[in-house]
Every structure is written in structure tokens, then in C-alpha cells.
Image (cartoon, helix red, strand yellow):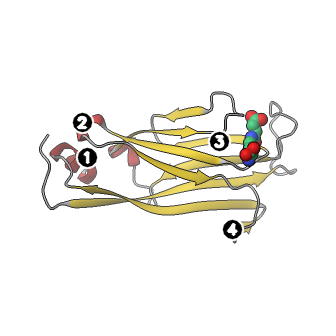
Amino acid sequence: NKRIKQVSISKPILYGNIATKFSPVNPMPINAPKDHTHSWTIFVKDPTNNDLSSYIKKVVFKLHDTYPNSTRTIESPPFEVTETGWGEFEIIIKIFFHTEGGEKNITLIHHLKLHPYDGIISMDGKVESVRYDEIVFNEPTESMFSLLTKQ
Ligand code: SLL
């Protein structure tokens, strides 16, 4: 698996969460614990909706230990987890690339936001905390290069 010298490929991603407070239009699920106040979704996606699974094998979201099965592994798109809860916490996101590419996994940390502070834009009761980032592959292997450039 030879590396291609002096080549660098960067892939844009968006990661973060949206959250909605329970209300008549967003009612609490029947099975949700009574102290929960919000539903939320944490995600990793492509800003232009390209299919990330061309080079991403799986995404692992590590939730707060108060959640049952707090390590959630998502093996195909959409790479997201939807839950209900009452509190904000750090979510550890591990992105794994297809094994044949020979790249190490990367770790991102997202602070789950439920409340509309810190300059977060909130519309219709929805809170969004989303970050744009680029994953840079320096001198990718030939197999990684073909995964990154396939349409
Ligand atoms: C803290 N920020 O540091 C808080 C933790 C935990 C949030 C917040 C529900 C879990 C469940 C939930 O919202 N946990 O009931 O499944 O202590």
C-alpha cells in the first residue's frame, strides 16, 4: 500500500447537533424518561450531501454514561444518533476510514447544545451547534486515494 508523495486531499465535513425542546409540536416520546426535556440528533455529514461512506467505514458516538449503551456505532449513512435527554455534555466522535486505506481513525469532540445561548442561532425553538471542518489526508496510500476520489 504505497503512499503518494506530495499529494494532499482534504474532505469537508459538518458535525454537530440540532436539538428541539419538547412542546405540542415536538411531543415527548412515550418511552422517554420523565425528566427529559429535549430531543436531539448528533451527526457527521458532508456539507454538499455527498456520500461519506465512500471513504468512511463507521462513526462511533460516545454519549454520556447516563445513557444506556452509551457507545453508539453507526456503520452506514446517515452517520447520526437521535436521542432524548435533559442535559448538555461532550460527545466523543470517532471516525473510522475503510481499512484498506491504511489511515488511522480520528477523534472529534462536540459539546451537545440544547439551550439557545453562546450565540447559537435558534429558530422555531430549534437549537443548532454545527461545525465545519476538513479532514486532511497527507500523502494518502494508493487505496485511500482511490476511495477519496471515487465518485
Ligand atoms: C453533567 N452535563 O456533566 C451533565 C450531564 C447528562 C445528560 C448531562 C439523560 C440521560 C438519560 C441526559 O440528558 N443526560 O436519562 O438517559 O453532569
Neighbor class of circle 2 (other Cα within 10 Å; few <14, some 14-19, many 20+) is: few
The quarter of the picture where residue 11 lies is bottom left
Q: As shown in the figure, which amino acid type bears the numbered disc 2?
A: Glu
Neighbor class of circle 3 (other Cα within 10 Å; few <14, some 14-19, many 20+) is: few
Callout 2 touching callout 3 (CB < 8 Å): no
Q: Position of residue 75 (x, y in %)?
A: 45, 34
Q: Is residue 103 visible?
A: yes
Front label number (2 vs 3): 2
The quarter of the picture where residue 139 lies is bottom left
- How far is disc 4 from disc 1 in space, using C-alphas? 35 Å
Front label number (4 vs 3): 4
- Residue at label 3? 82
SS for tag 3?
strand
- How far is disc 4 from disc 3 in space, using C-alphas? 20 Å
- Residue at label 4? 120
Front label number (4 vs 1): 4
Q: Is residue 151 visible?
A: no
Callout 1 touching callout 3 (CB < 8 Å): no
